[in-house]
Amino acid sequence: MGSDHPVDKDHQKTKTRASAARGEPGAHRDHPGVKRAFEALGPRLEQWRRGPRRPLTLFVVHPASLKSELLLPDPLVTGRLSAVLLGRDARCDVCIDQDAEVSGRHALLVYRTFGYDGSCRVFDLSSGTGVLGLDRERISGEKLLPPFALVLGDAVVFGLSPSAPIEPTSDFGSIRWNRRPQARSFSTSPWDERPLGMLAARGRRGTAGVELSADALDRGVIIGANSRSPVTRALAGDDSTVCDKHTLLFRHESRTQAVDLRSERGTSYADCPISVPLPLPDAEPSRLVLGPDAYATWTPYARTEGLP
């Protein structure tokens, strides 16, 4: 498939962002609203410091007062991933409904429920204003370690962990924030220059398909009627049962995963609803059912030791 598809655009910007995340020299400018938002937390930070020792706490401040708080659960004895959806839509786990700059489904935070160290990955769901770090760089797919701050529209999301304590009286500038996300690892393997597989979709408007590279899956690929989805021409339409942002396909720890984005009809695999990120088979096609008249199929390409 051609390289002019939306999932492959802005490749140079992605490389620049990865270079910045590795700590290479560059101008650093704090986002102007983050310090003000941190100061607005006030007594809630004291409550957090004295409260249960959870691996990660998310605080959402919009734009000058606390909007909501979400405690991620304690680690469970499972190897599964969990996800937190942030956006303006009422179905989101964290609903930021008073900010027109926040998309309906704006971002997804993915974290492991077993052996959890407070880290997570953030995926920008093709939002209008993006997900910004402290240095105003737009990010998607990178790993975050607390304490971190993300900007979604006018809202600020703080991720705090007991492993990186913050005193309520601390000055914002004195805190050692994770200002830049950890860069995704880029292998020098010849396979990285080749597509990892084919994503195909069938809907009321026909079929569509696209080959996806490792970089595209690392950033996350939306399956749905959204104009930036690589299979939108098959799934879009006035009578479509598929949401704009229905399912996210992404790669985590070398496995391709799928998760439903709180869509109205849900996403199912092998007749089972996908409520948390699900690793897909490496050696056979996986059909994701999006509605009565729509489905998407992920077909991984075979891996061999040698190149032809």
Image (spheres, rainbow, N blue to C red):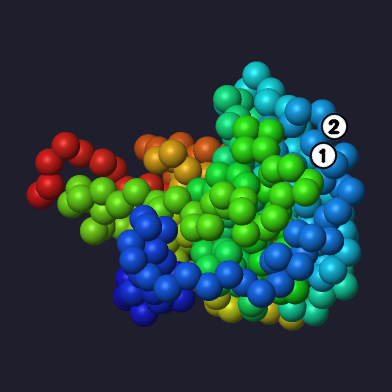
Q: Nearer the viewer, residue 103 or 298?
A: 103
**Residue occupying the point 74% across, 78% down:** 101
Residue 135 percent coordinates (x, y): 53, 68
Residue 51 visible in the displayed image: yes
In the depicted structure, whether residue 293 falls above or below residue 273: below
Report the side of 56 relative to 144 (left or right).
right
Disc sitting over residue 36 in the figure: none
* Quarter of image, res 235: bottom right
In the depicted structure, whether residue 209 falls above or below residue 123: below
Q: Tag count in the figure? A: 2
Secondary structure of the residue carrying tag 1 is helix
**Residue occupying the point 79% across, 60% down:** 39
Residue 9 percent coordinates (x, y): 40, 76
Q: Which residue is mark 2?
A: 51
**Residue occupying the point 57% across, 40% down:** 119
Label 2, label 1: how far apart the Cα atoms are: 5 Å
